[in-house]
Image (cartoon, grey):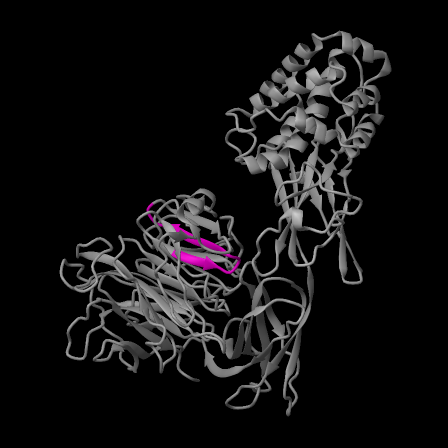
Amino acid sequence: MTADTGLAVGMPTVTNEGATVKVTLDNVNNWFLRWLGVWLQFRQAGTNDLIPIASLPADTLEGRTGPSRMDRPFAMFVGMMPPASVLAGIPIDPGSFAPTIKIPPGAASTEVLYGGLGLSGMKSGLVRDADMAALVKPGVAMTVLVNYVLVELFMALGATPMPETISAIVELVAEGLAIVIVDLIAEVDFNKASPGEVVQAIVTELALMIVTKGVDDLIDKFIEKVLPTALTQEILDATPVVGVIARAVADGLDMLEIAETTVEIAVSPPVYDFSMVLTRNVTVTLLPDSTTKAFPVKESNQIFYYKLSYQFDKGPSHVLTAVDLPPIGKDAQSLPITLDGLPLGGNVNVTITIYVRDASVPAGANDWCVAQASSGLLPNDASLAPALTLANNRIPINATTAYLHRSRTTLAADGSHRWQNDSNPPPYIPPPGDQQPGLGALRNITLREMTVRNAGYVGYSWQAFSSGVPGCGTDQGQYDYLANVNTDPANAQQGYASSPCGLQSGAQLSYSLLSDDNLNLYLDPAQLYLRPIQLGSSPSFAGTGLAFGQLNVESSALLLHPAGHVVSINQEHHLLETLRLPGKALDEATAARTYRARVHAGRGSRPGLMNKPVAAVVSGDGVILVLEASDTNNRIQAFDLGGNPVSYFKGQTTPSFFYLKATPNAIYLDITVEFGGYIYVLSRDDAGVHRLDIYASGQQGTDPICTTFNFNASAIAVDYYRTLYALNYQALTLPGGALPALTEPSISRWSPPAP
C-alpha cells in the first residue's frame, strides 16, 4: 500500500517481553484528508475463526482499562487515525496513530482495519452491509465534521482555521469525541442510494450539534477549543448558519468543489484491511530415500537445486524457487534446511522437490526432478520440525520425452476397481450421449496427493446414462456423476466412492493438494452450490444441505487455490470467479447469503480479459493459468486471485500471455501444471488425433519442449512426480463386457520414460 492509495504502510515495531509479543502500529501513515477509525480482529490458530473480543485479555490494547461501547462482537475499537497536515492545500505531514497491542495467546493472525469515508468500489450508499457500517462510522463522522462542516462554517463566517485546530481536535478525540459523534448520527442510514444524501444527513446532524449547547460536555469543549473565541457567541446566536453549511456542502458534493477531500474519498476504499502473522524459523530435515538409503547423486557437469513450498490449509502458499542445494557429504544421514519467517498457526504441508540440470545449458532447458518429499498437513505450532524422507527418481523432461501409458482402471467380476498394467492407451471413441446406457460428456479430473500419512485419490466427473443409478429424481437419462478412486496401484478400490444419484448437467469437482480431508468440494449444478466432499478413509459425496458458498454462473473448470479460495471459469460469458472459502461447510441459506463468488475478467484480448476460456489450473506458487480457445486468443493467460494479469511467463514478450503458436487450429481439452512449472496442454484435431504438449513457464519461444501423440483422453491432472492421470473415453465394463449399474469412464496413469 502506498501514499497514492491514501495509506503508506511499512513494517510495525515488534518486541518480545517473555512469552508476550507486543506490536506497535507505527507503520501506517495517512496522507489523505480524511479520518479513519482503527479496529483490530484476531483469528484463532488452526480454525482461522475470529476470536470474540469479550474473550480477549483486558490488557490486549495497551492503555485501555476496559471495553469500549464502540467494540463489535469480533472487532475491537482502537481509536482514530487523524488526516494529513496541509499547508495551502498541500499535504506536508501524514496523520499517524501508533497504538500498542499485545498479541493474545492462541491468535495466529491479527487483522488491522482502517475504516472511513471512501467510495472506491461502491455503486450506491457508503457501505455494503451493517457490519461495514459500524467500522466506517467513526471515520465518516469525523471527516464530515472537520473537512466539510468546519471548513464551510469558517468560510461562511469569513474566518480562517488556525493551525492548532487539528491538534485540538486530536486531543478531544483521545477523550472520546468520536464516540459521542457516532452516537449523534446513529439514525443516519449508511445504505442510502446516494452517497451525497448520506453525507448531507450527517452534515445536518453535526451542524445542529455545533449551534446547540448542552448536547454533551465534550461537544461543548469542542466548540470552546476549536472555534475562534470571537466567533463563539456569533455561532450560537446564528442558527441560520446550519442552512448555510448544508447548502454549501451540498453544492460542494455536486460540483466536487471541496476538491482534495472529495477526490480522495472517491479513490479510497471504505475499509483498509491489513493482516499480521507471527513468524519463526523452522528446520526441515531431509532424510535419504527409504529404498536406496541414499541421497540423489549428480555428475560433475550438473547443478543441484531445490524448490520448497509450505502450503497452509487456510492461507497463502509460499515457495522457495531454484535454491542451490547445500553440499551432501558422502556418508550423510540427513540434510537440514532452514525456512526463515514461517508464519505460525493452522496446519501446513511442507513439500520439497530436488532438481538437477546440465550446467552448460540455460535453466529450464533440461531440468528434471531427481527426488521429492511431502509432509502432509502438520500442526503449525512451535514444535514443527518436519523430517522428510526423499523418494528418488530420474525422470527428466526434454525434447525427446514422450509419455508412456502405464496402467488404467478396470472392474473385477464383483464390480470392484483395479489398476491394471497396460502399455496401450484406450482408443478415442466419441461419447454417444444417447438415451441408453453409455457415456456422455466428460467433465474433469482432480488429484489429492498421496503422502506417508494420507491416501492419494483421483476424483472425476462425467455425464452418462446409468441403468442402475438414475437421476436424483426418479427418472433415468443422461446425468452427471462423481467418483473417487485410490491412486495406490495395489488398492484402487480402497476409498472408492461415487455420487448416490445423477446430478444436473455441469458438475465439477476439485480436491485439495494439501491432503486436507475436509476442504474438497464439488459444484452442484442445480443451484450452483459448492458442496463438501469428505475424503479420509471413507470418502463420501453426500454433501447435500451444506455448502461452502455459491457461484454466480456455470463452471467450465473448478479449482481449489492453496490460499483457501475456489476459482471457477465460465466459457460462455468469458468470466473468472473467485471465492474465499469459510473454514467449514455451512447451511445453504448462510452460504448463499455470505459466501457468493466475486466475478472478474470479461470478454476481450488485452491483459485481464479472456475470450472463450476452455480450462484452467493453479500453479504451485498460486498463479491461475487459463487456457483460451484456438479460434479466439489461442493462449494461456496468468491471473492472480483478484483477476489481475500476472507476469508469469518471463521469457515471453507479454509475460502474462503464452501464445500457443504450435497448435493454431487445435481443439483444446485441458491444462495442468506440475510443481516445477512444466505446463501440460491436451488437445485434439478435427480428425480426432490427440496430442499432449509440454511447455516451461520460463521458456523463450513458443514451441513445446516435447509432444506426445495419441494421448487419448479428455482431461488430465499431474502429481508432484510428473505422473499424469487421464480421464478416458472408454467406459468401464465387467469381465464379460457388460456395463455395470453405474456407467463410468476408466482412468489411465501415464509417466515419462526413465532416462
Camera-side residue: 89 or 746? 746
Q: Is residue 587 left or right of residue 230?
A: left
Note whether 725 is above or below 423 in the view shown: above
Say whether residue 560 is magenta: yes
Q: Main secondary structure of the magenta part?
A: strand
Residue stretch in magenta: 558-572
Give residue 365's position: percent from left, percent from top. 50, 73
Q: For the point 56% across and 87% down, which residue is it?
A: 297
**Could you tell me which quadrant the C terminus lies in?**
bottom left
Residue extending furthest bottom? 331
The residue depicted at 75 percent of the width and 34 percent of the height is 82
620 or 287: nearer the viewer: 287
Q: Is residue 333 magenta?
A: no
Percent x, y for residue 728?
A: 27, 69
Identify whether 665 is placed above or below 709: above
Number of numbered tags placed on the structure image: 0
Residue 288: % across, % down: 57, 86
* Figure quadrant of residue 479: bottom left
- Whether residue 633 is visible, yes or no, is no
Residue 376, can we see it? Answer: yes
Above or below: residue 289 compared with residue 440:
below
In the displayed structure, 137 sits above or below 114; it is above
The structure residue drawn at horizontal position 72% and vertical position 49%, both measured from the top left corner, is 10
